[in-house]
Image (cartoon, coloured by chain):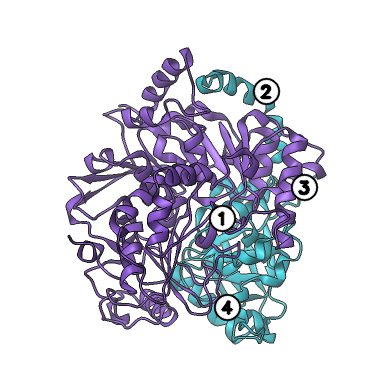
Amino acid sequence: MALDKISKIQGTALYVPGNDIDTDRIIPARFMKCVTFDGLGAYLFHDVRFEEDGTKKAHPLNDPKFAKASILISNANFGCGSSREHAPQALSKYRFRAVIAESFAEIFFGNSTTLGMPCVSVSHDDILKLTSVVESQPDTEVTIDLVAGTVTAGNVSVPCSIKPGARDALVNGLWDPIAQLLDGAEQTKAVAAKLPYLAF
Amino acid sequence: MGKNLFQKVWEAHTVRTLAGGQSQIFIGLHLLHEVTSPQAFGMLKDLGLKVARPDRTFATVDHIVPTDTRLRPFKDSLAEGMIVALEQACTEHGIRFFDVKSGHQGIVHVIGPELGLTQPGMTIACGDSHTSTHGAFGAIAFGIGTTQVRDVLATQTMTLAPLKVRRIEVSGRLRPGVYAKDVILHVIRTLGVNGGTGYAYEYAGDAVSALSMEERMTLCNMSIEGGARVGYVNPDEKTFEYLKGRELAPKGEAWERAVAYWRSVASDSDASYDDVVRFDAASIAPTVTWGINPGQAISIEEKVPRVEDGPTAAEQASIKEALDYMQLEAGAPIAGVPVNVAFIGSCTNGRLSDFREVARHIKGRKVAAGVRALAVPGSMDVARAAEAEGLDQVFRDAGWEWRQPGCSMCLAMNPDRLIGRELCASSSNRNFKGRQGSPTGRTILMSPVMVAAAAVSGKIADARVVFKA
């Protein structure tokens, strides 16, 4: 199955401010009682979006101005904590196709890449430039160009970075590695044959 | 120039370099649990693939199991469905399943070592970020997402970018009343919750060598809370001693070969590192969190920070958010903050030595009025060993609930959870907003003995004072 080559993501964006937004915040553990990822989008950021009685809190995801946003912008160390793929799955099922932040936690970054959802890093000051455009003009189309290494929002264009391995995997349509891993079956056997502990 | 353990294990397990610089890495041991793995079997089915190495794959149930009654079916039909899905997958693919019937069920990071599955020089993956725990044995162990669980099931390999290695050297001796939990909270507090991103942490120095295997597990367990996906301690005589005679550890003639391999993977004395950070063991005090991530920590003798203590606007915003959520008074001592719940357990601090150490202190000391105190062994083996020593009775006599094994209130996917804004003194690993099951519940992380001090005092307290004489 050929995968999409992801080199450009376009869409409107919303800003969820804060450093160290953890995976429990993105998807609280009690919503992980499921054997499929379908339906997780409804619980994205649940506890910061809803009161316990279900009424909506003030949160960018509840703001009609951003009802169509498909790019999420945040600050440093986004996605820290658990390895739960439920976090990027919830973002992806909700509607998000990319995340722009100052930095990402490592496991979250890897999980997102494997789903074909790029996570690009932008400096603190440039995040502020982007969010000032997005918040004042929510309809502004934001473009992430992985090849050029830029994020553009209206008249603002800022540099972005992504680990070269992840960028190449996305751009070349190899972000789901299963086909490549299966291709390496012979070499895998050779490596296993040399590992002493498999014969203990 | 010699090599460090990470470099040696990485090289031995590298299958090939893929386009773009990622490596295809062989996984020596794959551990499964019911929350992150059942979906992967579905993916495997969709692709028409089989499990490549069922002999290197082991499963248990921990996150969603109730700790009061474990009669099946569980009252929670969603939890029951998850267990059934994992049971069926294990049967279909021939994977050994350490369920309750096996007598060895428990938290995946507790049972791997105690069964002797976890060994030096291995790569170990599991759909759980606290897989770093197994690094205590000199393994390269890390958490993975569900799609990667699929990759490992299908090929026994996965893609990974190489990590840099930071040696964290803790010299000298820990003061009495200071535990491995305090060391790791101190390290995270100092280096930050994202300080370890891109790194494996090698813990070393005489204070680390002096730790027991169970304490080393506590240390490595929370590496991920400092952003480091991998944390390890070089294997030594203590490591071999711990493994000897374990059910699935090498035996007979294989034992000698195993020890020789295990010795060979330890970092060379002239190994190079990308970074070295040094700590003085004697400067570490009992440490507790005050905020909403594990880096927001202070010693029990310190005061809760004020917003203006933050050096940048972003850090000031983080402090404000944490103070608002935790409802703590800025500038006030952390000691004295009232607690509602005390929890001892989890993959961080749910092992036999944790319960022994606490039992030693709580004999004859009752839990304060109004405090709900839970002791949850990390595994059936831990529970059996503790009960054989009468520790369960010590806890019960002191007013604690002695529960059955599981992750329990660390992340509250089972019925054990905080209610409303309750504040919990907890031996677990995360104090994120809502972590312990109530969207407004509050968590203060600390060592098990400090949890016990909070339980008997009804407030956050210095265990060295509470249990003096």
Do the dots labelled 2 and 3 sit on one chain? no
In whole angstroms, how far apart are the C-alphas of marks 1 and 4?
A: 22 Å
Q: Position of residue A184 (x, y in %)?
A: 67, 29
Q: Earlier in the sequence, mark 4 or mark 2?
A: 4
Q: Which residue is mark 4?
A: A48
**SS of the residue at dot 2?**
helix
Disc number lying in front (3 or 1): 3
Q: Which residue is mark 1?
A: A109
Q: Earlier in the sequence, mark 1 or mark 2?
A: 1
- Letter of the chain shown purple in the rendering: B
The chain ID associated with circle 1 is: A
Do the dots labelled 3 and 1 sit on one chain? no
Q: Is residue B169 above or below residue A83?
A: above
Q: Which residue is mark 3?
A: B42
In whole angstroms, how far apart are the C-alphas of marks 3 and 4?
A: 31 Å
Q: Position of residue B44 (x, y in %)?
A: 76, 42
Q: Is residue B100 above or below residue A74?
A: above
Q: Nearer the viewer, residue B10 or B378?
A: B378
In whole angstroms, how far apart are the C-alphas of marks 2 and 3?
A: 25 Å
Q: Earlier in the sequence, mark 1 or mark 4?
A: 4
How many residues crowd mark 1 within 10 Å: few (<14), some (14–19), many (20+)?
Answer: many
Q: Position of residue A170 (x, y in %)?
A: 66, 51
**SS of the residue at dot 3?**
helix
Q: How many marks?
A: 4
Q: Colour of chain A?
A: cyan
